[in-house]
Image (tube, rainbow, N blue to C red):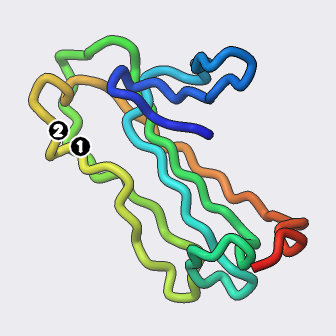
Amino acid sequence: MYSIFLKLELKRANTAGGNKDSLIQNVDALRFIYYDENNAITTVLGNVRTVQIALVVRASNEDYSFTDNRLYSIKDLTPAANTVDILDASTLPSSQKYFRRQLLTAVVRCRNMWRWGS
């Protein structure tokens, strides 16, 4: 299980002691979008064939010569290629606007997901 905490860290549960292991720091947003075999968005685990992952990370230190008001978004994989907003930096508190950020994306094809059933 993966989760984001208020310290802007992505952590994973450690089954060998109940602790959480830090995977990455300075995470502002993480989004998973699940698709079926026709690239339609789905919430049914047995229908998932592709996962689109979007991650917004930020620098460790503020840059006061820079103000981030960017809308971080991606195009989904549906035939309509809809825009999916990941993070709207213009809505962040002013203390958070001086960080440089980067949007990272990946598409994972789940070849064996059909074996899990519906």
Identify residue for label 1: 89
In what element is the residue under mark 1? Answer: helix
Q: Which quarter of the rendering shows the C terminus?
A: bottom right
Relative to 102, say whether 106 is above or below: below
**Residue 78 location (% of width, % of height):** 57, 82
**Residue 103 location (% of width, % of height):** 47, 43
The residue closer to the viewer here, 78 or 70, is 78
The residue closer to the viewer here, 54 or 113, is 113
Question: Residue 97's quadrant in the figure?
Answer: top left
Q: In 3D space, how far apart are the residues under numbered discs 1 and 2 (Cα atoms)?
A: 5 Å
In what element is the residue under mark 2? Answer: loop
Asked whether the beta carbons under mark 1 and mark 2 sit within 8 Å of each other, the answer is: yes
Badge 1 local density, few (<14 within 10 Å), some, or many (20+)?
some
Residue farthest to the front, as pictured:
17
**Residue 20 location (% of width, % of height):** 58, 20
Q: Looking at numbered disc 2 in the image, what kind of residue is underneath it?
A: Leu
Q: Is residue 112 left or right of residue 87?
A: right
> Residue placed at 28% from the left, 53% from the top?
71
Identify residue for label 2: 92
> Residue placed at 52% from the left, 71% from the top?
76
Badge 2 local density, few (<14 within 10 Å), some, or many (20+)?
few
Q: Looking at numbered disc 1 in the image, what kind of residue is underneath it?
A: Ala
